[in-house]
Every structure is written in structure tokens, then in C-alpha cells.
């Protein structure tokens, strides 16, 4: 699998009002495509024959919801689909963290967040990215919907969110930029300063390489005594799509802001709780700004009740995604794809998928679903 190397190309000279006017013109996301009996009879040939139109529609709408296709009810058919569309699989941007488990490595298929321990954890809107690595597209597939209800897949148009946000809020966030903390380590605040600095250095060496990010270890950013947080570098919440140039809301604040996470179902332990800060002062986002991000984001969420074989093909630079809480067992999976329009964005790095025993053991303890999932039709 290729490792997509495209770095965010942040555009720091965006006219916020003009960007909102431009973003407002886009069609509703996602486009829904239902299979007819004739389409199903064609199998993978349907996607091969309609490849150019579907790829153009993906850029136009930001996401396509394929419904009622028998081909994708099994792992092998799902792979045939994306091969017919000419999509090139890549590693998950967070693969090196060990948090991403393959459902079927040979098919470049990762499990979504199906872990029983996170059933009641609401995953807010986000794009799959770090400051260093971002996938171009994703194909989210349903193999088994939640057996006892819930688990709807959430998708929202980053252009629509950008156009919806109050201009003064968007301008403030754009001017100040944001930083996101990705982990917490609580140590006794009474420890001597030299010991604290030593701990910070050790954590920096241990944590940063796994997340493939430029992280800064900062004490007590959220005001809690003794708390050491790994914080990403400053970034703009607005980006331009690398292919279309469309301005979009490209921020994970809806998912990571603590004031939002604390007010909804959350199953993440404290060590993994995130926070979003203003980059200029390292203060957490105000409740007012968090509420506006929540309002604008959730107004444009489409919640999909996906059936086995349904696939949501997402432009990761345009649409944000998430997942509602669920009960019972659920098996959704995802394949990530790199850019194919511009070789400079992809890079030429190839990495061996590391068999990290420790991370595999953690995943094994937390996840009771099978590693490889094949339906009777695959």
C-alpha cells in the first residue's frame, strides 16, 4: 500500500466573506445512487463503464452513497468496485499509531470503530488527516448494520458548513488558527521541574512518531495541574480543495472540542480525550464558538442508515464524516485512497505494514469481531 504523502496546502490569504459566497453554491452532499436490477446484473462492469461520470460526480457532490448494490456485500466484491473505479488504496493517515486495525489486509480494508467498548461513543464530524498525511478519498462499506439499532453513518459537506458558519466566528477562527491536543498524561503536579521536563522528553520520543505528526508536549494547556498534553501545530480551519480549489471547512473541531465531547455520549478514556485551542493564546475554544461550530456542522449532517452492501464514497478534502452511537454488533469497514491526478501530492514512499505485537494485542482485547469478514456472497 502506498502511504499518501500529501501535506496540507493551507491557504492563509483567504477572503472569508468571498469564500463563504463561493462555498454556498455547491449541490447537496451526498449524491444518492440506487442500483437497478440491470445495474446489479452488470456487477463490477457497472462501475467500470460509469467510472468517468462517477469520479466527476464525486468531485461535484463531495460524496456518493451507493445503495442496493449486491457486489459490495462481500469483501472481494467491494475491492472489485474500487478497482473498477481506478482508485489507488493507501494506508490510513493514522496507520502508524496502531489505532487502525485491518479487517482484511490483502484487500486494503480497515475496520471502522466497531469496538464494543466504543458502542456508546459518538464520533463527531472530522476529516481523516494529520498535519503530514491526508487521504484523498475513502470508501466506507457496511457489511453488517448494528444488530440492536443505531450506528448511523454521518456525513456533511465542508463547503456547506463553511457557508453556514457566522462570518464573525469563522473570521475569528481563521485569524487566530487552531491547535488540537491528541492525548493527556496526568502526572503529580508536585514533581520537581527537572523531573517533569524529563517526562516530557520521554513522552515526546514515544508518542510523536506513532502519530506521524509534529507534536509539542505542553503542560497544563487546559488548566489541569500536572497534565501533559501532546498538541498539534497551528492550522487554519479553512482549506481549498487541491483539485477544484473550492474553499471548505477543513477542521476536526466538531469531533475534538472538549466542550462538545463532554456534552454527548463519549466512551474515550481520559488519556485519549482531545481539546481544541486558539493557536495564538493556547486557550480552549470558547463555549460560544463551540456551539456555533456545532450548530453549523449539525445543520448539514446527513445520517445514513446503511444496509449490507451500501458504500459511501467520500472526498476526504470536501466532506467530513462521523458515526452515531449503536447497540449490539456492527461491522463497517473502510478503504483509503491516494491522489491520482498529481504525482507530486502522492510522493513515492512505500512502507511495510508493521506487525506491532503490542498494538495488535490491544486491538484484540477491545474488539470481539472477527479479523476477516466475508459474507456468503463473497
Image (cartoon, rainbow, N blue to C red):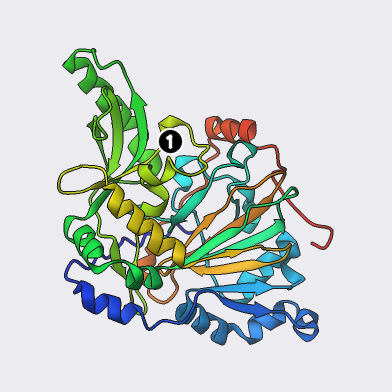
Is residue 180 rendered to the left or right of residue 45? left
Q: Position of residue 270 (x, y in %)?
A: 43, 31
Question: Above or below — where is 203 with respect to 158?
Answer: above
Residue visible at 61% across and 77% down in the picture = 32
Residue 318's spot in the image, x, y percent?
42, 70
Given residues 61 and 223, the one toward you in this image is 223
Q: Looking at the picture, does residue 72 appear above or below residue 20?
A: above
Q: Is residue 103 above or below residue 97?
A: below
The reply, left or right, for residue 282 in relation to residue 209 is left
Q: Is residue 135 visible?
A: no
Q: Position of residue 144 (x, y in %)?
A: 73, 55
Is 41 left, or right, of 291 in this rendering? right
The residue that disc 1 covers is 272
SS for callout 1: helix
Q: Residues within 10 Å of mark 1 (few under 14, many from 20)?
A: few
Quadrant of residue 53 within the rendered picture: bottom right
Q: In this view of the protein, which residue sits in the foreground, 52 or 29?
A: 29
Which residue is found at the position 33% from the left and 73% from the top? 163
* Quadrant position of the C terminus in the picture: bottom right
Would you place residue 137 above or below residue 32 in this image?
Answer: above
Residue 102 visible somewhere in the drawing? yes
The residue at 71%/60% (across/down) is 75
When asked about the image quadrant of residue 348, the answer is bottom left
| Residue 115 screen position, x and y as percent | 62, 41
Amino acid at each position: 500500500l502506498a502511504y499518501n504523502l500529501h501535506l496540507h496546502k493551507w491557504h492563509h490569504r483567504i477572503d472569508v466573506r468571498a469564500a463563504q459566497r463561493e462555498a454556498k453554491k455547491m449541490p447537496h452532499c451526498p449524491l444518492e445512487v440506487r442500483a437497478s436490477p440491470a445495474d446489479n446484473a452488470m456487477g463490477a462492469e457497472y462501475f467500470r463503464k460509469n467510472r468517468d461520470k462517477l469520479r466527476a460526480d464525486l468531485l461535484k457532490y463531495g460524496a456518493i452513497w451507493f445503495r442496493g448494490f449486491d457486489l459490495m456485500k462481500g469483501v472481494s466484491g467491494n475491492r472489485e468496485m474500487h478497482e473498477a473505479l481506478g482508485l489507488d488504496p493507501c494506508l490510513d493517515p493514522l496507520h502508524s499509531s496502531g489505532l487502525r486495525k485491518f479487517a482484511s489486509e490483502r484487500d486494503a480494508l480497515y475496520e471502522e470503530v466497531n469496538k464494543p467498548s466504543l458502542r456508546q461513543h459518538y464520533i463527531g464530524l472530522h476529516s481523516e488527516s494529520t498535519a503530514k498525511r491526508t487521504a484523498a478519498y475513502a470508501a466506507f462499506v457496511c457489511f453488517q448494520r448494528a444488530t440492536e439499532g443505531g450506528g448511523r453513518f454521518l456525513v456533511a459537506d465542508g463547503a456547506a458548513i463553511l457557508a453556514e458558519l457566522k462570518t464573525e466566528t469563522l473570521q475569528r477562527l481563521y485569524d487566530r488558527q487552531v491547535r488540537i491536543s491528541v492525548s493527556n498524561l496526568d502526572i503529580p503536579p508536585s514533581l520537581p521541574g527537572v523531573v517533569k521536563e524529563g517526562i516530557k522528553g520521554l513522552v515526546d520520543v514515544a508518542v510523536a512518531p506513532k502519530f506521524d505528526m509534529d507534536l509539542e508536549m505542553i503542560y497544563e494547556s487546559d488548566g489541569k495541574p500536572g497534565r501533559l498534553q501532546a498538541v498539534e501545530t497551528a492550522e487554519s480551519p479553512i482549506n481549498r480543495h487541491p483539485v477544484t480549489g473550492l474553499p471548505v471547512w477543513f477542521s476536526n473541531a466538531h469531533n475534538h472540542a472538549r466542550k462538545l465531547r463532554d456534552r454527548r455520549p463519549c466512551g474515550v478514556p481520559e488519556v485519549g480525550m482531545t481539546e481544541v485551542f486558539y493557536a495564538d493564546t493556547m486557550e480552549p475554544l470558547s463555549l460560544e464558538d463551540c456551539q456555533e461550530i456545532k450548530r453549523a456542522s449539525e445543520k448539514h449532517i446527513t445520517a445514513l442508515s446503511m444496509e449490507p452492501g451500501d458504500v459511501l464514497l467520500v472526498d476526504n478534502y470536501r466532506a467530513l464524516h462521523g458515526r452515531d452511537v449503536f447497540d449490539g454488533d456492527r461491522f463497517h469497514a473502510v478503504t483509503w485512497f491516494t491522489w491520482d491526478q498529481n504525482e507530486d501530492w502522492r510522493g513515492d514512499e512505500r512502507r511495510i505494514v508493521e506487525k506491532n505485537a503490542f498494538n495488535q494485542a490491544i486491538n484484540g482485547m477491545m474488539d470481539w469481531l472477527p479479523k476477516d469478514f466475508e459474507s456468503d456472497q463473497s
